[in-house]
Each structure stands twice: as C-alpha cells, then as structure tokens.
Image: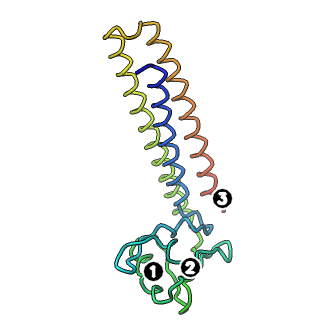
C-alpha cells in the first residue's frame, strides 16, 4: 500500500464522519417542519418493521406542521404509536385519514440544549477524523520501519494528511456554525 492510498483512505473516513454529522444535524428539530424528523421512524406493519416513508406520504402543509397520510388507512394507529414511542417530543393529531404534527415553538432553554447537541455531534465528528489520522500515522511509521518509504516520504505524507485533516475539520466547523445559527434563529 502506498502513502497516496493511505491518504485517500483517510479522506474517505473523513467524508464518512462529515456525512454522518450532516445526517444527525438534519434530524434535529429546529422549530421548522421537515419530513426528515419522522420519515425513518420504524413502524410495525404487515409483519415486519418499515420506515414511515415507505408506508405513507409525508408533506409539509405549513412551515410548522407535518402531515402523514398512509396509503393504507388501517396503519394510522400503528404510525401514531411508532411516533409517540420514539420520544421525539412530537404529538400527532389523528384525523381519521391522516396524522398532523404541529411543531411547538422552541423555548430559549430548548434552543441552548440543541446548541449543546450540535457541538457534541461536531466533537464526535472531529474525534472520528482524529482516529482516522492516527491510523494513517501508524501505517506511515510501520512503512518507514519496514524500509518501504524513506523518512522524507513519511514527513511529506504526514503533511499532506494534516492538510486533509485541516480541511475536514474546517468543514465540520462550518456545518456546526451553520446549524447553530439555524437553531438559535427565532
């Protein structure tokens, strides 16, 4: 394995961490309705567990409400039970044909809690990035001790790796800052 391949593998790990971070951020309730809040909630239907998005149409009729209209009306109760069982802080209203979820206005205290969560997710992503960097560093040292690369090659590879780490951390910071602003926006 070459240093280029190791750096490429590390960058792939960085991208996974950033992708996961963005996925977690999309699930945070910021006071605006989003289908992402409920679409992957597992529902027991037809003898198996399926996400809501495969059982119903999810729409956003207003900026602060979500409408879930199952294709099979008999699943309405199961979908409602699944949402309540997820402890998302959402209370669906069953109209007999669909579920309407009105999102509550976020209090200042809840916004601050969400910001803490945003920072926690960002720190988790940075930890993953550091672990991938550490793994690559160990491989570089191993290659050097096995005379597969020279010390200069190792130093050059470590600099290139650090540049990739800095870029990934910058992406994490940008995503974190954007989400924090979104959460604090009234």
In the rendered image, which quarter is residue 132 located in? top left
CA separation in Å, label 3 and label 1? 31 Å
Q: Read off the residue under disc 1.
A: 79
The residue sitting at 58% across, 35% down in the picture is 170
| Badge 2 or badge 3: first in the primary sequence | 2
Q: Position of residue 183 (x, y in %)?
A: 60, 57
The residue located at (51%, 57%) in the rendering is: 114
Examine the rendered structure and indicate whether residue 136 appears above or below residue 65: above
Q: Would residue 163 be visible to someone looking at this image? A: yes
Above or below: residue 85 compared with residue 133: below
Nearer the observer: mark 2 or 3; the answer is 2
Give the class, few, some or many, for how many residues have Cα within 10 Å of label 2's Cα (few <14, many ≥20).
many
SS for tag 2? strand
**Label 1 neighbourhood size at 10 Å, few (<14), some (14-19), many (20+)?**
many
At 42% across and 83% down in the image, what residue appears? 78
Residue 80 percent coordinates (x, y): 45, 82
In this rendering, would 115 be left or right of 63?
left
* Residue 94 x %, y %: 52, 88
Residues at marks 2 and 1, CA–CA distance in whole angstroms: 9 Å
Which part of the image, by quadrant, shows the N terminus? top left
> Mark 1 falls on what kind of element?
helix
Q: CA distance from mark 2 to mark 3?
A: 26 Å
Look at the image and tell me whether residue 87 can be seen. no
What is the number of the mark on residue 94? none
Q: Which part of the image, by quadrant, shows the C terminus?
A: bottom right
Of the numbered discs 3 and 1, the one sitting upstream in the chain is 1
For discs 3 and 1, the disc positioned in front in the rendered view: 1
Do callouts 2 and 1 mark residues in contact (Cβ within 8 Å)? Answer: yes
Q: Identify the residue at the far bottom of this view.
A: 96
Q: Mark 2 sits on what residue? A: 68
| Residue placed under numbered mark 3 in the picture | 185
């Amino acid at each position: 394995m070459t240093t280029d391949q190791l750096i490429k593998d590390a960058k792939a790990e960085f991208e996974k961490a950033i992708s996961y971070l963005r996925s977690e951020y999309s699930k945070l309730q910021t006071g605006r309705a989003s289908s992402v809040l409920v679409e992957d909630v597992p529902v027991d239907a037809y003898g198996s567990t399926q996400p809501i998005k495969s059982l119903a149409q999810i729409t956003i009729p207003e900026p602060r409400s979500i409408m879930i209209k199952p294709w099979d009306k008999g699943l309405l109760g199961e979908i409602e039970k699944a949402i309540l069982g997820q402890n998302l802080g959402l209370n669906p209203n069953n109209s007999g044909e669909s579920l309407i979820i009105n999102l509550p206005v976020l209090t200042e205290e809840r916004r601050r809690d969400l910001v803490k969560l945003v920072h926690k997710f960002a720190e988790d992503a940075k930890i993953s990035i550091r672990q991938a960097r550490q793994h690559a560093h160990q491989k570089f040292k191993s290659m050097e001790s096995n005379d597969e690369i020279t010390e200069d090659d190792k130093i050059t590879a470590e600099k290139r790796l650090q540049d990739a780490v800095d870029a990934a951390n910058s992406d994490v910071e940008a995503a974190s800052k954007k989400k924090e602003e979104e959460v604090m926006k009234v």
